Image (cartoon, rainbow, N blue to C red):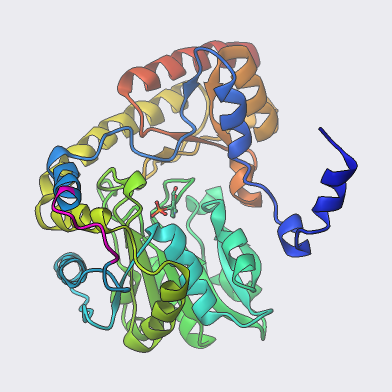
Amino acid sequence: MQSMETVKMRSFISQSVQKMRPSGIRKYFDIAATMQDVVTLGIGEPNFTTPQHILQAGVDSLLSGHTAYTSNSGTIELRRAISTYVERLYGVSYNPDSEVLVTVGVSEGLWVALKAVLDPGDEVLVVQPCFVANAAAVEMAGGVPVPVNAYADTDFQVTGAALEAAVTSRTKAILISYPNNPTGAVLSREYLLEVAAVAERHDLVVLSDEIYERLVYGVDHVNFASLPGMFDRTIVMSGMSKSYAMTGWRIGYITAPAPLMEAMRKLHQYLIMSAPTMGQAAALEALEHGEQSVQFMHEQYDGRRRLIVDGFNSLGMRCFEPRGAFYAFPSIAVTGMSDEEFCDRLLMEERVALVPGSAFGDSGAGFVRASYATSTENIMLALERLARFMQRHG
Ligand SMILES: Cc1ncc(COP(=O)(O)O)c(C=O)c1O
């Protein structure tokens, strides 16, 4: 009911929150939830349940009565395991006592990292298309997001020139997330070095969201801090959600040099106290014994990736080969529709839920995001329905 009270109550809400745009993804989930027989490729989380041995470690932790807070930074066992893991994968060495923080997912990590480096009005170059929370997180931390677009002609890899053109005297940081949500792009070493050169030239902090780091296909993931000269100015955020099918456990982590970490720990301590205790126990098991599970899920995603990319291309929806994460990002240009209209009509006419690319930034317009973190049967059914849709509209 829209009463006077509701209108009046709105004045209680801060201007900055009122101005914040709601996520463009939610709308489709909300509509799809009211419909029968919808095939959704809209959701950005694994369809796997957390592997049994990891799940069991969380349960055991609870049943052993470990229900209290942990150290603010996370258990020392988990921080050691994170440090060992990062060193094993990338040869970058972080001190578990002072350079590793266990967070409530990258979601908290992102906010803590931004808040630690930004003063009010500082600008952050936000590479787009990107995760819908990125620009909002910059605003929530008091900064100003400056979109820097990556385009289809470079397979959605950002160029140094695009970043350089957006730098002003207020620029404080660059926020990148590769492997990328929504495009599936991975930034090649060549382009990463261009980003590094801009950071160095203008003395910027680089915030690198590497949550999809283990989900790369036929290419290597490069940890941004491992690039020459980048360790001291890089905050890497990652976590358990995607590679280990642990979205609901809410465990992520930040690795960064000690002075930056000290600032982030202070914020984390006031905001969160400590990440979920049973989740930390599960994450420890995952990092120490979860490699086979990662490989298994990776193989499954890779098969689905080929299926969906071939499917889109054969329907005339041009799709570059995504080398990371679990998203494909085909063009819908042949239909002459906007990406929003395409998604609306596809949902209504064929009951397939995709997400319009423009929800992730301006350069996503004309594309749609399809998550293949769903069963092969679902993907095949969605392609069948899309084929009918494209016959009418392609
Ligand atoms: C690029 C990116 N970063 C971060 C997140 C959130 O991760 P977490 O579950 O660790 O908070 C997501 C989730 O979709 C994502 O796609």
Q: Residue lying at the far right in this picture: please name it.
A: 4
* Image-based side of 218 in relation to 60, left or right: right
Q: Is residue 42 left or right of residue 96?
A: right
Q: Main secondary structure of the magenta part?
A: loop
Vertical placement of 376 versus 54: above or below? above
Residue at image location 32% in from the left, 24% down from the top: 375
Is residue 237 shown above or below 243?
below
Identify the residue at image location x=53%, y=53%. Answer: 130
Residue range of the region highlighted in magenta in the rendering: 63-69
* Residue 173 drawn at (x, y percent): 53, 77
Residue 84 percent coordinates (x, y): 14, 70
Task: Report whether residue 144 is seen.
Answer: yes
The residue at the point 20 percent across, 58 percent down is 66
Q: Is residue 65 magenta?
A: yes
Residue 92 x/y as whole percent? 22, 76
* Quarter placement of the C terminus: top right
Going by the image, does 311 lie left or right of 38? left
